[in-house]
Amino acid sequence: MKQIQEIIRNMTLEEKVKLCSGATFWETESMEQHQIPSVFMSDGPHGLRTQKGEADHLGINNSEKSTCFPTASASAASWNPRLLKEMGEAIAEEALYYGVDIVLGPGVNIKRNPLCGRNFEYFSEDPYLAGVMGTSWIKGVQSKGVGTSLKHFAANNQEQDRMMGNSMVDERAFREIYLPAFEMAVKEAQPDTVMCSYNQINGTFASDNQRLLTDILRKEWEFQGMVVTDWGAMNDRVSALKAGCDLEMPNSCGFFDGEVKQAVEEGCLLETEIDACVERILKEAFKAQETKARAGTASHFDIEAHHALAKRIACESAVLLKNEGGLLPLSKSAKTALCGAMAEKVRYQGAGSSHINPTRLSGLREAMESIGECVAYYPAYEIDGGRNEEALARAVAGAKAADVAVVVAGLPDSFESEGYDRAHMSMPESHNELISEIAAVNENVVVVLMGGSPLEMPWLDQVKAVLNLYLGGQAVGEAGAGLLYGEENPSGKLAETYPVSYSDVSSAETFGVNPRQVEYAESIYVGYRYYEKAGIPVQFPFGHGLSYTRFEISGLDVKSTNSLEFTVSCNVKNTGSRAGAEVVQLYVADQTPNLFKAKKELKGFAKVYLEAGQEQRVSMTLGQRAFAHYDVKTRNWEVLSGNYQIQVGVSSADIRLTEQVQIRGTLSSMGGEDIPQWYIRPSGKPSVADFEKLYGQKIRPFELEKPGQYTMLNTFHDMKDHPAVQQILEGMKQGILQGYGGDENDPGFLFTFSIIMNTPLVRLVQQGGGQTPLSLMQDVVAAANHDPKG
């Protein structure tokens, strides 16, 4: 500490300002004159996307080979924090090998809506589950001395217009749904860094948000580390420094330096405020230096051991959604028709900045053929989801002659990606058609799903079994085959609800409608909290997942350790004929009627592994926070006095045991007289008037700027109708297409072009590394404004 203070005293203002911005795309500044080392960062979070050559954050350029573990959408379904810790440890070992100081992850944003294009990178619709899994991952990585970056802080729940969108969220929802996963990770794991998001939160950009970055993060939660921007998320450097945003990434070639120096000279920014940011950067730099000195130069990492871990996580993360008549596991001697191009070219990860170059990759076809004695493969559709009539006919004929048909379907690469949101919740029509056609000729149909998000299943009643592999990482083929043939027993549970149709989703009428002004009108009613309170049937409930064995839960015992703390215990017995695992889920339900609260909330869980016939006693604890809500009047977490039901089950909809407890809390009532009735008894969707009353201000209709009003904060998409802009865009489009063989449906092209179209022009300059001149973007704005002189 003394050394750091001495360094700061010897630094000039210019050096301090320079240190607060990256040196390159992935690296911070080093200053030999002050013996300040640099810090090297790399994308995560389900593997290491390390670039030693030409750098980008779009997943375009090649990265070093690393283990591609299951994405967060999959690993969360394992409900096994120990596995997430092991994954973190393995990723840290690879980071040490490649000289990476900080891995950019985990992402603990809430799955507010199933159409968010980046949901595959996030854990859950439930903040408690997301917090537990993210915390374990951080502990695993940082146990090896490698840093992490908890992201994207905060209320970053869409991809469309993510750099300009304003998340309009009421305080109850902000505190109870969108912040708790971050809070848990900070308090229990102390990540080295927190990454602020692109978006605005109630009108203030995250990078400029003092309430978020200082008042909540540092003062309330006692965060000790460094805040770094998402790549290109810096809005106003002076405001950001005052707010406690320490490091701008990547290098913006001094874009903001002049403004910062001027602000100091004019007294608008104190140099001591910059010093505080510099101090946190220096602490991280010297910590990274110590880790490298202690670890030395790693000569290798265990590729085979890490692949085996990826397979184990994929096996535990797969969710058996349906298994009518015990069709699964399959007999190895069964004549099996394996249908669907995804069986050969598996979907195992998402597109964008988290795209991993895997050390190896297993396909489902190859893995099934190595186990099954009679497997015939039929592609049935084009890999991009296109229809192929001849291939479909061959698949149907093959399925008709088979004992069982395994249909591999889901979401193609282009359907979900960072940078843009899904257009709907459907699979390609070719996939739905294939399943229905095969179900018409074979009564034994197994559907294997690959994709990072919920989807509609109009064919569900026509098939006997559904196995959801999500995006299961580089070992997904081996894992899937092992599960189908019974070498492994499914134990995954959904970390998100699968609605029957998109129209049932609580945010269906606000998500994507106006991505610049995002009204979180549903408030706390996200996922199962909404479906249960509103009485809406779902396709598969939160926490659902079947096994090849059976479990019995009994002997519930709830003991009070003090007035607001309880120990909850029960017995779990494997009553089936084979070993397996069950996830015991603990929910708390406030029994006071007519409350602005969910019917129940997840507050604990335990995954139990049992041999056939084995029984085990499981204990979980409930603290005061498990019964609390955030009170906007007292600005604190409060507990309502009254009766609460402790519920133990195997999904949010399958509660096996209950016991009622009486709580003497901190409040006698919640004062719901000011709350619109929709939030007490939700039915359908909330009105604008309902949300305005809850939010506390009038919602003004958003109007996009018109010609003559455009600024550097507008995007190419905003100005796309102007002929001059169209000409520029066409040239850019053709240049990008050359890198993708001219294929406009290539997911890499779709992602890249979407980022360019929806990034404010000033951010393109900031991220351009000097290759995107400010004058060029100013000329674009001038042209779109019909003002050639600008």
Image (cartoon, grey):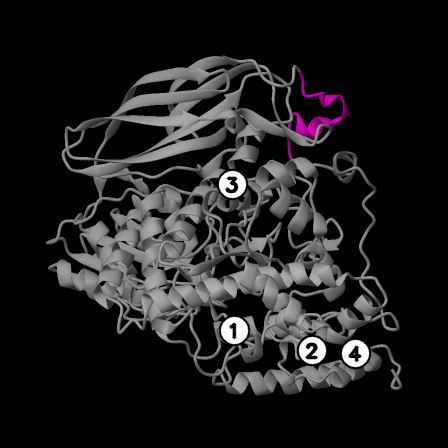
Quarter-of-image position of residue 566: top left
Which callout, 4 or 1, points to the residue nearer the camera? 1
Name the kind of residue labelled 3 in the image.
Pro
- Determine the main secondary structure of the stretch shown in magenta: loop
Classify mark 4: helix, strand or loop: loop
Are the residues flagged by discs 3 and 1 in contact, CB closer than 8 Å?
Answer: no
Mark 2 neighbour density, 10 Å: few (under 14) some (14–19) many (20 or more): some
Disc 4 to disc 2, C-alpha distance: 31 Å
Question: Is 676 inside the magenta-drawn segment?
Answer: yes
The CA span between labels 4 and 3 is 44 Å
Look at mark 4 in the image and give the residue it sits on.
722
Q: In terms of sequence position, does the residue under pointer 4 or pointer 2 come before the other?
A: 2
Residue under pointer 2? 254
User: Where is mark 3, residue-wise?
Assistant: 127
Q: CA distance from mark 2 to mark 3?
A: 38 Å
The residues tagged by marks 3 and 1 sit, at their Cα atoms, a distance apart of: 30 Å
Judge depth for marks 4 and 3 and give the one in front. 3
x, y percent for residue 687: 74, 37
Instruction: Report the span colored magenta.
Output: 669-684
Name the amino acid, label 2: Gly
User: Where is residue 394 drawn, in percent x and y?
Assistant: 28, 67
Which residue has dot 1 on it? 26
From the viewer's perspective, is the residue at label 3 or at label 1 nearer? 1
Please give the name of the residue rendered at 39% of the width and 56% of the height, measured from the top-left corner.
141
Residue at 69 percent of width and 78 percent of height: 254
Indicate the position of residue 383 as horizontal and vertical percent values. 39, 70
| Residue at figure coordinates x 39%, y 15% from the top left | 559
- Which numbered disc, 2 or 3, marks the residue that appears first in the sequence? 3
Residue 359 shows up from this direction: yes
